[in-house]
Amino acid sequence: MLQRWLTALESELEPVGVAWLITHSLGCLLAANLANRPARWNSELHDVGYADHINIASGFGRWEQGYRLFSAFTKTVEDQQAMQARPQLRDVLCEAMS
């Protein structure tokens, strides 16, 4: 069953390019298996340890580390998109030489 889920998730992620995967409960098992291949997905794994459920009821309150991680994720994606949007010197030279 897990292998089927993993295959399905990878096939959904493949065409997307950029995705944030935040999991809980059974999704953690799937994410942990996906995390065994971080190089394939150009990704990072952030392990928060034995935190159980990260929510107000568990005593976490406003989870500042989570907000910082999410901000770092979005900044990384925005930076990558900005770099891709800029014309590369090679592209500019080739266009000028045509």
Image: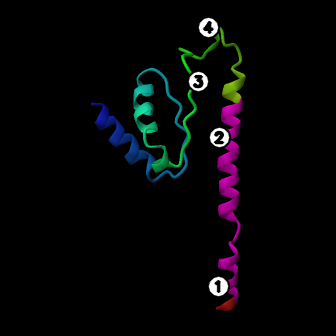
Specify few, some or many for label 1: CA neighbours under 10 Å numbering under 14, 14-19, or 20 or more: few
Judged from the image, the secondary structure of the residue bearing numbered disc 1 is helix
* Viewer-nearest of discs 1 and 4: 1
Mark 4 and mark 3 in contact (Cβ < 8 Å)?
Answer: no
Q: Which mark is residue 73?
A: 2
Rendering coords of residue 87 (x, y %) = 69, 71
Q: Earlier in the sequence, mark 2 or mark 3?
A: 3
Rendering coords of residue 77 (x, y %) = 65, 48
Q: CA distance from mark 1 to mark 4?
A: 59 Å
The answer to if 69 sits in the magenta stretch is yes
Type of residue at label 4? Ala
The answer to if 31 sits in the magenta stretch is no
Between residues 39 and 74, which one lies in front from this camera angle? 39
Q: In the image, which residues are magenta? A: 68-96
The residue indicated by pointer 1 is 94
Q: Which mark is residue 18?
A: none
* Viewer-nearest of discs 3 and 4: 3
Q: Name which quarter of the figure residue 54 lies in.
A: top right
Type of residue at label 3? Val
Q: Earlier in the sequence, mark 1 or mark 2?
A: 2
Q: Earlier in the sequence, mark 3 or mark 4?
A: 3
Q: Name which quarter of the figure residue 66 lies in.
A: top right
The residue indicated by pointer 3 is 48
Rendering coords of residue 6 (x, y %) = 35, 38
Type of residue at label 2? Phe
State which quarter of the image contains the N terminus. top left
Judged from the image, the secondary structure of the residue bearing numbered disc 4 is helix
Judged from the image, the secondary structure of the residue bearing numbered disc 3 is loop
Specify few, some or many for label 4: CA neighbours under 10 Å numbering under 14, 14-19, or 20 or more: few
Q: Main secondary structure of the magenta part?
A: helix
Q: Earlier in the sequence, mark 1 or mark 4?
A: 4
The residue indicated by pointer 4 is 57
